[in-house]
Each structure stands twice: as C-alpha cells, then as structure tokens.
Amino acid sequence: MKFFIDTASLKDIQEAQDLGVLDGVTTNPSLMAKEGIGGDENVKKHYQAICEIVDGDVSAEVISTDFEGIVREGEELVKLDDQIVVKVPMIKDGIKAIKYFSERGIRTNCTLVFSAGQALLAAKAGATYVSPFIGRLDDISTDGLQLIQDIRLIYDNYGFTTEILAASVRHPMHILECAKIGADVMTGPLSAILALLKHPLTDNGLAKFLADHAKVNG
C-alpha cells in the first residue's frame, strides 16, 4: 500500500518524508487555503516546493468545472513538474477531461468519488487514481469502507488498472481496514500515519528495557 499525505503543509510533508514511508502527496483548494496560499502563481510555486520535498506523485487540483477550463488548467499544472498528477472532480466534464488527459499520457486523480458507479466511470475514462472519500461517507452514517470493497471487486472483475486511493482517511483503523481490503493507496493527515506507531505495550516494554539497563549501567 502506498502512503500519501493529504496536506499543503510543507512542515508536515517534510516530517512524513523524513519518516521514510511517504509515497506521495494529495492537496486541494481547501488545504491550500488552510495554509494561507492564494493566487495562481503562489499556488503553482507551492506545488513546486512540494515536489522538491517528495519523490512520488503530487496531486494538484483544478478549479474549473467546464471541460475547456479543466483541460487548460491541467495542461498548465503538468508543466510544473513530472510528479504532478491532475486532480479532476467527478462531474460530467471531469470525466470527459480525464479521457482527454489519458489519451495524451497525462496522469489524473478523479476526486470527490462517493459511489461505485462513479468509480467505474472514472476507470472507464482512464483515470490513474480514483479517490473515494471514506471519512465523509462515515460522517453521514454510510459505510465508507464498504465502498472501497465494492470498487476493489469491480476493478478486479475487469482488470482496470486505475488505482484505488482511499481518501478522507481520518485515523489508523481506516488505514488498516483499507489495507485489508486492498486499497492501492491511502491519503490522510500526518496524525493518522504517526498513530500507527503507537502501542502501549511498545511504550511499556521500552520503558522496562531502559530501566533495567540503567540499573546495571548507572
């Protein structure tokens, strides 16, 4: 399973990179706004800064919702760095744009996916990644993990190469359950990744080892 971090914070991206398990980054306009980054040129410079930190794919989201605008923005974004993947919303013109991009070798991430039918359309159009938002489904009392399971089954049935990128991951159990189901990628906050490190028996065991060492080496 690939680990992506879902943020525009260079500090968090660097910390995840230093941990040695980071495979890529996903961002969106809300995350950019959270970091106070506005204006087309500033956003593009920030994407380039992210690409300098990580070695893997960096999803950069378009703002336009019409076919021509999505294509124009996407073609501008991929010029920034070879690592850029164009993040396109799951709308009619988005699917048309994904098909356009896939025919030209431009990689895409179809975002805001909330149903297996949407994921099927994204794969048919040639999306590189599809991003089902499991946390947001959980928020409305719908099983987000079941959606990952359904998409995995459909993609395996027909040999689709589109990777399932479990998005809106909130906590370590989301990560573990997605790994069991067979999601190709997970993206979430740094806190969810770091939480995988934690176990009280590890903490207690280490404390005992260090205490025993101190007794004979004090």
Image: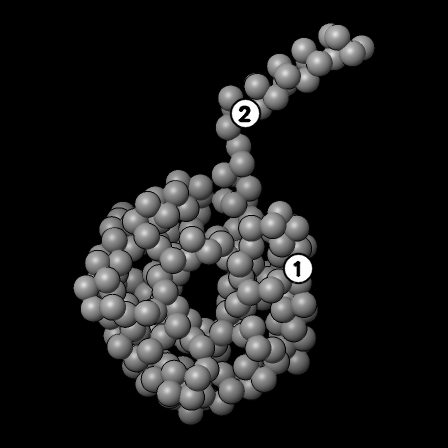
* Residue designated by label 1: 10
Query: Quadrant of residue 206 in the image?
Result: top right
**Pointer 1 local density, CA inside 10 Å: few below 14, some 14–19, many at least 20:** some
- The numbered dot on residue 202 is 2
Residue 171: percent from left, percent from top:
44, 43
- Work out whether residue 142 can be spotted: no
Question: Regarding mark 1 in the picture, which secondary structure is present there?
Answer: helix
Seen in the picture, residue 108 relative to 143 is either above or below; the reply is below
**10 Å crowding of disc 2: few (<14), some (14-19), many (20+):** few
> Which residue appears at 37% of the width and 87% of the height?
103
Q: Is residue 93 left or right of residue 207?
A: left
Q: Residue at x 52, y 38 (%)?
A: 195
Residue 47: x and y, percent?
A: 62, 71
Q: Earlier in the sequence, mark 1 or mark 2?
A: 1
Observer able to see residue 92: yes
Query: Which colour style is shown?
Result: one colour
- The quadrant of the picture occupied by the C terminus is top right
